[in-house]
Image: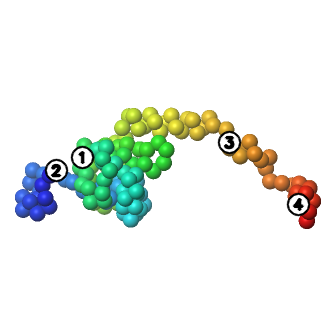
Amino acid sequence: MRSASVRKEQGDAGMEERLRIDKWLWAARFYKTRALAVDEIGKGRVLVNGQPAKPAKEVGPGDRVMVNKGYPPIEVVVEGISRVRGPAPVAAKLYRETDESAERRARAAEMRRLAPEPSLDYFDGRPTKRDRRILAALRGK
């Protein structure tokens, strides 16, 4: 990998455009602020080409980025670079989600949809006035 000074001397001729991962995540609307992106990168929740990244890691078209914002993590391929944060339809053109990632997310969404509501096992709604009186009597109030 070439150093920044060598790149400046050579100019942009023949070099593919690259951008810091924290700026790219912000521009692609994965995180609302660059500070949040830096925090998540620091926690190891962002991988670039399968390796943990630092905020200054540069990404370009063709790089694979895995963002662990929830279950399951989202894996995308960088399609474009933008130095500004634009509207969501424009930001969506900066990346392409891999087929495996889309399949994992669809499977997880289906499992969540079919899962029983957790609170149904424990509660029948809010206690009524009568229920509260019974509870108060049991507690000795």
Quadrant the C terminus occupies: bottom right
Q: Which mark is residue 117?
A: 3
Mark nearer the N terminus (2 vs 1)? 2
- Judged left or right of residue 23, residue 9 is left
Residue occupied by mark 2 = 16
Q: Which mark is residue 139?
A: 4
- Judged left or right of residue 130, residue 118 is left
Disc 3 secondary structure class: loop
Q: CA distance from mark 2 to mark 3?
A: 50 Å
Q: CA distance from mark 2 to mark 1?
A: 8 Å
Residue occupied by mark 1 = 61
Mark nearer the N terminus (4 vs 3)? 3
**Contact? badges 2 and 1 (CB < 8 Å):** yes
Residue 70, how many percent across, how many down? 48, 48
Disc 4 secondary structure class: helix
Q: Amino acid at mark 4?
A: Arg
Quadrant housing residue 5? bottom left
Q: How is the image coloured?
A: rainbow
